[in-house]
Image (spheres, rainbow, N blue to C red):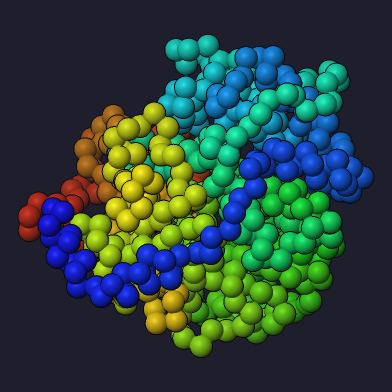
Amino acid sequence: DPRARHEFQNLLSPEEAEKQLDGLAGPTVELPDATFVDLFQERARGCPDAIAVEHGTVRWTYRELERRVNRIAHALIEAGVGTEDVVAVVMDRTPEWIAAALGVFTAGGVYLPVRPDFPVERVVAQLERSACAVALTEPGSEALVRAVSARLAAPLTRLSVTRVLARGGHTEPPSVSVTPGQAAYIYFTSGSTGSPKGALCEHAGFLNHLYAKIEDTGITAGGGDVVTQIASQCFDISLWQFAAPLLMGGSVRIMDTRTQLDVGAFVEEIVEGRVTVMQVVPSYLEVLLTHLEQHPRPLGALRSVSVTGEALTYELVQRWFAACPDVQLVNAYGATETSDDPMHEVLHGVPERDFVTVGRALRNVHTYVLDENLALVPLGTPGEIAFSGVCVGRGYINDEERTREAFVPDPFRPGTRMYRTGDFGRWLPEDRLEFLGRRDAQVKIRGFRIEIGEIENKLLTMEGVREAAVVTEGDTSEQRVLVAFFSGSREVTAEGVRDFLATVLPDYMVPTHIHRVDRLPLTENGKIDKKALARPAAETA
Ligand code: ADP
């Protein structure tokens, strides 16, 4: 109701409204009339012999990377890829994967990362939804892509990156112009109705975020910085981890998942690899700190650690500065739909307040705290966090309905889009934003964003399952696990449910514990009583 909105807005003095709309916005910084593609090419010409990518014992210089990028871009163009055509990159995290992602950008296409260990059904759904007609593969993903291709109604062109690179030829950039308003990438995030949503972001938002990360983590031009690439390729935070150093002449060092699972080896790699900047999720920071507290050692060249994806606790910040007083922490907050992180809190020590904020809006970003009528709430009052500005993505690909719910016209800046995060927050007197949790059943497990409803809906599609409910257990982000409860016909076992879920969901969405019950507990008004389920699972196990 627009009238109610105006009445509430009238509660704010003109000064307060102005402060919220302008004073709390990020600084306006003009973006170059260019994209990551031009700027990377320029950098590669400027420092051709500098190391661009490191992985184990492999080293590629900027010249070597750029040539591969151009070859892949030419092959894509020959395969018919034009402006904003979606290209699935079904590859593990290797130097070739980075060349493939950059190749897609350079050809003017839209990068869609797919993990080679994803279930066929999920990949089919993602490619269909994004009308993707071309996939880049590696030997380890060819079987998956063949299986996916056989199930797609439309033809899928499969290009082996290994073969494209072995073929030689073209090393000059193609004559394609990529513009800031063009779509750059899609990351699928969990969707509560059972099907994932493909968040589509544009080059301008991508570049804006890279510059903000470069500034706040202190990556300098002309090399010297080594940024670790740690995150899974289907998580949008993986993007800046390689794109930011490559914009500045630094190098990206890919850290294998195997190394990450062995925290001692992780620390060794940070020190030996002369890593200056890294990013982890809070649950991994906790693992790392526990190790460092038992085996204290200096972390070599490490200067900046970004933490993202979930709330960072004050306790972890205290422990961090006790262990590594000289290494800054950046609490980065945002959503895939807002080109990764529109807000940062940069910490050089333990904050005075006994909790951690998500800081301030980054360059060219507006942060609003709103009531349900999308009116500003008074400073200090909790409300829904929304973003406007260049960071806001274009929407969910080929999904008007869900796009309309979350991407709405900005009521304060006519003609621009605003993204409603579904997160609650409030402004603090020191002009920083406090994160207060979710409006819905979205959870984070080791940084992965998961809609509980997606798992429940998948469970209900299994033959013989009658009722299903999923809850989380564990207080800290490190301990948090998914627990599923179901009822149904006798033949359906917990093991059977686990096997079924593993064929339709990525591993991080398969519940750790699965319990069969005769009937799910209900509340007085007949809804599944999740609070009763969340009580000691042992009662029903
Ligand atoms: P990202 O890739 O930036 O982590 P996702 O799309 O995976 O974004 O998840 C976005 C959601 O994760 C946010 O809406 C919020 O609920 C949560 N989140 C992300 N970063 C933080 C943070 N620093 N503190 C608290 N919650 C966070």
What residue is shown at x 69% (from left), y 38% (from top)? 37
Q: Choose between 82 and 251: the one closer to the eye.
A: 82
| Outermost residue to the bottom | 352
Note whether 126 is above or below 300 in the view shown: above
Note whether 117 is above or below 473 in the view shown: above
What residue is shown at x 43% (from left), y 60% (from top)? 366
Residue 379, horizontal then vertical, whole percent: 32, 75
The image quadrant where one finds the C terminus is bottom left
Residue 257, horizontal then vertical, whole percent: 67, 50
Quick check: 30 left or right of 55?
left
Quick check: 93 left or right of 493?
right
| Outermost residue to the front | 14
Residue 487, horizontal then vertical, whole percent: 23, 43
What residue is shown at x 63% (from left), y 59% (from top)? 213
Quarter holding residue 279: bottom right
The answer to whether residue 491 of the structure is visible from this angle is: no
The answer to whether residue 215 of the structure is visible from this angle is: yes
What residue is shown at x 32% (from left), y 75% (from top)? 15
